[in-house]
Amino acid sequence: MKFLLKFLLRLFFRFRAYNLNVLDEKGPVILVANHVSWLDWLFLGVCLDNDWKFVTSRVTAALSPIHRLIMTSKRTFPVDPFSPYSVKQMTQYLRGGRRLVFFAEGRISVTGSLMKIQEGTGFLLQKTKAKVIIAYLRGAHRIKWVRHTGWTKWFHKVEVHFCGPFTPPDFSAYQGATARAKLARWLRNKIIEHQYLVEMEHGPKTIIQAINEIAQNMPGARIIEDINRKKLSYRSLFTAVDLFSEKLKFLISSTQSKRVGILLPNTIGFVVSILGLWRLGNVPVVLNYSLGMDSIISCAQLAGLKEILTARKFLDRLGINPDKFVKNGINIIFVEDIAESINWVKKVVMLIKKTIRPKLCVEADPDSTAVILYTSGSESVPKGVELSHKNILANIRQLILSVDVVDSDRMFTALPVFHSFGLVLGTILPLVRGIYVFLYPTPLHYGMIPVALYDVQGTILLSTNTFLKAYGRKAHPADFRSLRLVFAGAEKLQETTFILWAKKFGVRVLEGYGVTECSPCISVNTPMDPRFGTAGRILPGIDYRLEKVDGVESGGRLLVRGDNVMKGYLNINDNARFQALGGWYDTGDIVEVDEDGFVKICGRLKRFAKVGGEMVSLARIEDALNEEFLRYGQKLEIAVTSIQDSEKGERIIVVANSKKVLLEDVRRVLRTKQFPSLYFPREIYYVKEIPKLGTGKPDYRSLMELVKTLRDKE
C-alpha cells in the first residue's frame, strides 16, 4: 500500500523526499512539520515506518466518516485538543521511548506560511526531553486541499525535507510557563532556519528565475501599478521588458563592467529598466538623485558608467541639465524615446508571445552582481555596494519566512528605489512573492500618501520614523484602515510615533534594522514575535558576534555574516577592509542582544563622542530631547553632534530648528531623565532646517559642515 501511494504521489505531485536517514533516530523523538494542507499526513506517512504515530484531534475526527477513517487508526494518536490531559497522555507515550508526528501549529495554516507554535509543544519538550526532527513540506501550500485563499493548483510539485535530530536547550532555570514559551520560540526558529536553508538550496538561484517561477502560476494577475494608474500583469510587464531591452541593447556600449546607471523615481519605467538590463546581462547602478549633481557624477564615475537611463521630465524636476553628464563622458538614454520608438505591431506580436510563454529568458550566475547601490552618506562619502542575486534572494527569503505575507497583500512603496529598503523590500520582494505593489514617486507628499494608500487599499507599508510621524499628523483616522503590516526602518522608531499610530489608526508599527551592505535587513519585529523598544530578532541564516568597545559598558560592536551580506564595495580601500574580515561585515553599530535574541540599537559607533574618556551616545541624547520637546509641535526637530574639545576630548552640541529650545531647558530635560553630567551639551545652534537624506533621517555629514560654518561666523 505504501509503495502504491508513493507511486501515485510521485506521478501526480512529482513528490520527492530528502534526508530520510534522520528518521532512523530512536525514541523518544517528535517529528514536527509545518501544517499547510489536508494531505500533509499522506506526504509524511509514506516516508515513515509503522511505529510512528500521528497526533490527531478527536474533535476533527468526528466531523465525518472520512475524517474518522483517516484520523482514528493504528497509525494515529487521537487526543482531545481542549483537554489538559492530552499533553500528559502524549508525555507518557513518549517517555516509553516511542515516536510521534506532531503538527505544532495545532491547525492548518490560513496564510500558507508558519503560524504560531502551541505552547503544549514546549510542555512536551520540557517534560520528555525528546529529540526533535523537523520536516518541511515544500510546495504543499499550493495544492487544492488548503485553507488559505491564495492561488492553488491541482497537482503542484511537493517535496518533504527532513533535518535533525535536535536536542532542545535546557530552560530548567525558568518557571514552567516561561520555559515552555522559550522552547516554543526555539522550535519555531529552528523550523524557519531549516526552511530557509532548503529554499536556498532547492529554490530559484537568481531574481529573474524567482520572478519567472511565480509568473508561470499567475501570468494574468495585476501585480504592479504606479502614480500614472497604469496596471501591469506579469504577462504585460514581461512584454514591456522584452520590447524595451530589444531597443536598449543597440544604445549601450559593450564595456567590460557592463554597468549602466538608472536615474529614475518609483515608477513602472524603473522596474522595466532594471529588468531589461538584467535581460541583457547588464548590471544596474541605481543612482541616488537626492545627493545633488556633484555627488551623482562622483558615484557614476566610481562605477565607471558610460550610460545612464533617465527621463526628461524627471531631470527637469530635479533641475539637472543633461549636458553636465555629457561633459563628464556619460551618455544619457531617455526611456521615453525608447518607448515611443516601439510600434504597435511589435507590441501585439510580443504580447502574443508572452501569452503563450510568460517568461523572461535570462541566464545569470547567482553570485554575479545584480545591482549596485550607494550608502546614504550620512557620515562619510557614499560607498558603492555590490549586491548579488544570491544576496538579495537570501534576504527576501529570510523576511518572507519570518513574516506572514499572504497572497492578498498589497504593498505600498513610497521609499525611493535608490535606497535598499525601497528597492529590495518595497519593489523586488513583491515581484518575487507574487503580491501587488503600488509605486509612489516620493515619500515627501505627507498629505497625499495617506489618501493614495486609502485609494489602493494597501495592506503593507514600509517607511521610516520621520515619514510615519508626518503621515500620522496629516492622515484621517480611516486612511489607514486597510493596513495590516507597517514596518519602520532606516532610523530609530520613537515611542511617540508608535503611540500615535496605535491610538489614531489602531496599527502596531514594527521596527526593523538593516544596512545596504546586508541587502538590507538584519533583524525585524514580526506580528508573531514583537518586542517594543528593540529592532526585533536577527533573521534566520544570519550569524552575529559582538566585539567589545572601550568605554561602552553594555553591548558591543555588531558584526554579521550570511548569504545576504554583500559581495563588496566599489571603493578600493573600503573593500580591502571588508574582504579582510573573511565574510563578516562590521556594521559599525553598537547594539545589545538580550537572552531571547532581540536586538537593541544603542547607536552608530561614529555617533558616540568620547567625553572625558567615556563613550557618550549622541543618539540617546537626541532621542530623549526629541521625545521631550514634541510638545512644542510636531515640526520641531533636534539633532545632536560633537566637535573636538581641547579639555575633554569632544564637546556635545545641540542643533535645533526652533529658538524655543533653550540650552538650559535641554540640560533640565537630561537631568530629569537622570543622564550623567558628561552627557550635557555645551552649546546650541539654531538652523532653519535640519539637513535630511532621501530617507528622511538627519544628514550628519552636512550637519557637521553647517555647525562649522556657524561657529566660524561667531
Image (tube, rainbow, N blue to C red):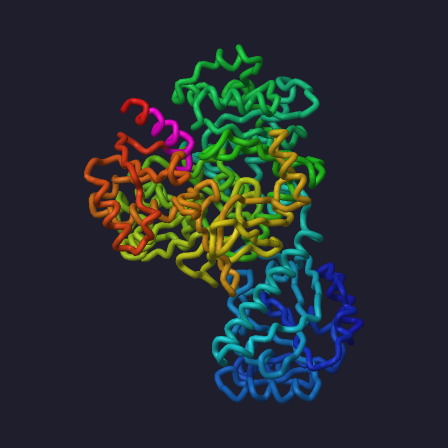
Q: Is residue 160 left or right of residue 150?
A: right
| Residue 234, percent from left and from top | 56, 40
Residue 659 in the image: above or below residue 343: below
Specify whether residue 351 is in view: no
Magenta region: 692-709
Residue 429 in the image: above or below residue 335: below
Q: Residue at x 50, y 29 (%)?
A: 381
Q: Residue at x 38, y 38 (%)?
A: 647
Front residue of 44 and 97: 97
Front residue of 243 and 296: 296
Front residue of 387 and 77: 387
Residue 338 lies in the magenta stretch: no
Front residue of 205 and 703: 703
Indicate the quadrant where residue 26 lies.
bottom right
Specify whether residue 678 is in view: yes
Q: Is residue 18 left or right of residue 248?
A: right
Q: How many marks?
A: 0
Indicate the quadrant where residue 657 lies.
top left
Q: Residue at x 61, y 65 (%)?
A: 190
Q: Which quadrant of the rendered structure holds the N terminus?
A: bottom right
| Residue 237, percent from left and from top | 55, 35
Residue 96 in the image: above or below residue 708: below
Residue 703 lies in the magenta stretch: yes
| Residue 254, percent from left and from top | 69, 20
